[in-house]
Every structure is written in structure tokens, then in C-alpha cells.
Image (cartoon, rainbow, N blue to C red):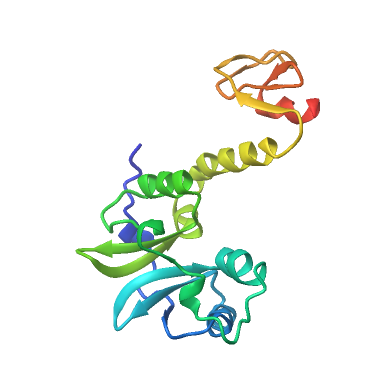
Amino acid sequence: MKTGYRVIDVMTKRPIVAGVDASVRDVAMLMREKNVGSVLLQDGGEFVGIVTEWDLVRRSMAESLDADTTPITKVMTEGDGMVTASPGMDIFEALQLMREHDVRHLPVIDGGRLVGFATLKDILRVQPQLFELIAEKYDIREAERKPGFAERLDSGECELCGNYSERLREVRGVTSCPDCFQDVE
């Protein structure tokens, strides 16, 4: 599905950037000051990684690292772990990339150079109807963490409401649609 909007149409052209010499606390304070959920990291002008709130919580705080002495490079995502977009990519493709890799932030790279930054909020601000694509994943992921949840089934008729669904689940022996499977739990 093409939306007609490209990543370059929604991206931030001046993302918040920190150097690799910063500490975890420096980056956390920068995030608070700029009211952002992620910071891109550069080493001598070259884009080398990204740090998100998720990284700060799970890789720093949960590991009891000292925020003042721990270099941000210890908690950043870099190299193969980074998911990036190109400026000409359709925002639907960018959203699919985010969904596939379970990220909400995409550094935008053109010719090996950082040219911007796109977030899930940026995309949904322009095309709110794409929310369904991402919401489905979070609904499913939330349900999967609950006891009694089974694998996704093929499409068919919900045993509870009788409606056709392409997202049937079997929960505690009952085949149901997303609207009904929470009732079974």
C-alpha cells in the first residue's frame, strides 16, 4: 500500500544528537531537556548509533549501571542492531519496518549520511489511519503475554459472536475474534 507520503515528508531534519563521549546521565538529561524519547549518537560527525528511553531503562537502570560514569556507548544500539530508513521510502513501508523490528524510531540515512529522523508519532500524525496496522501488533503482543493464549489461527467465523475475522485466536479451546478473545480470558 502506498500512501503518497515519503519519509522525507514527515521526518525531523534536525534530530537531537549527542557525542559518544557522553555519559548515560548526560543523554538522559538531554532527552528531558529537549522532551524527546531518543537521541542519535555521533562520533566525529559520523552517525554511529541511537539511544532510546527503552535502552536507558533496560540496559542501564535495570543493570544498575552508574549513570554518571557509564559511557552512553555501553547502552546504545549500533551497527547491525540499528534499523534505518531512506528518505524516499513510503511511510507505509517505514511503518512496516518499525513493526517488523519492534522499534518506534528510524534514523534516516541517504548515501551513508544521516539526513533526518522519523518516529512512529511523525508517521501517525500524517496518516492516522495507519494506526490500525501498528495497534494490531500491540493488541496481539499484549494478549500473548496472558495465560491461556494460543497461536494465531487462519481466518474464519468467531465461535462467540459469529462474525468473520482474519485474526482468529484459540483461547481455552474457544476460537474467537480479537473483539471476543479478551472475554474468554
Q: Nearer the viewer, residue 105 or 23?
A: 23
Q: Residue at x 74, y 37 (%)?
A: 146
Question: What is the quadrant of residue 48 in the picture?
Answer: bottom left
What percent of the width, then of the height, locates residue 22?
Answer: 47, 85
Across and down, in percent, residue 185 comes to 80, 29
- The residue closer to the viewer here, 171 or 168, is 171
Task: Classify residue 141 as left or right of residue 127.
Answer: right
184 w.r.t. 57: above or below: above
Q: Nearer the viewer, residue 185 or 72?
A: 72
Q: Is residue 83 left or right of residue 161?
A: left
Count how many numbered circles sit on residues in the image. 0
The x and y percentages for residue 1 are 35, 36
Residue located 33% across and 56% down the image: 85
Q: Residue 177 appears at what percent x and percent y?
A: 66, 23
Quadrant of residue 165 within the rendered picture: top right
Q: Looking at the image, which residue sits at the far left?
A: 111
Give the left or right position of residue 68, taking residue 160 as reference: left
At horizontal 72% and vertical 13% (from top left) the residue drawn is 159
The answer to whether 145 is drawn above or below residue 70 in the figure is above
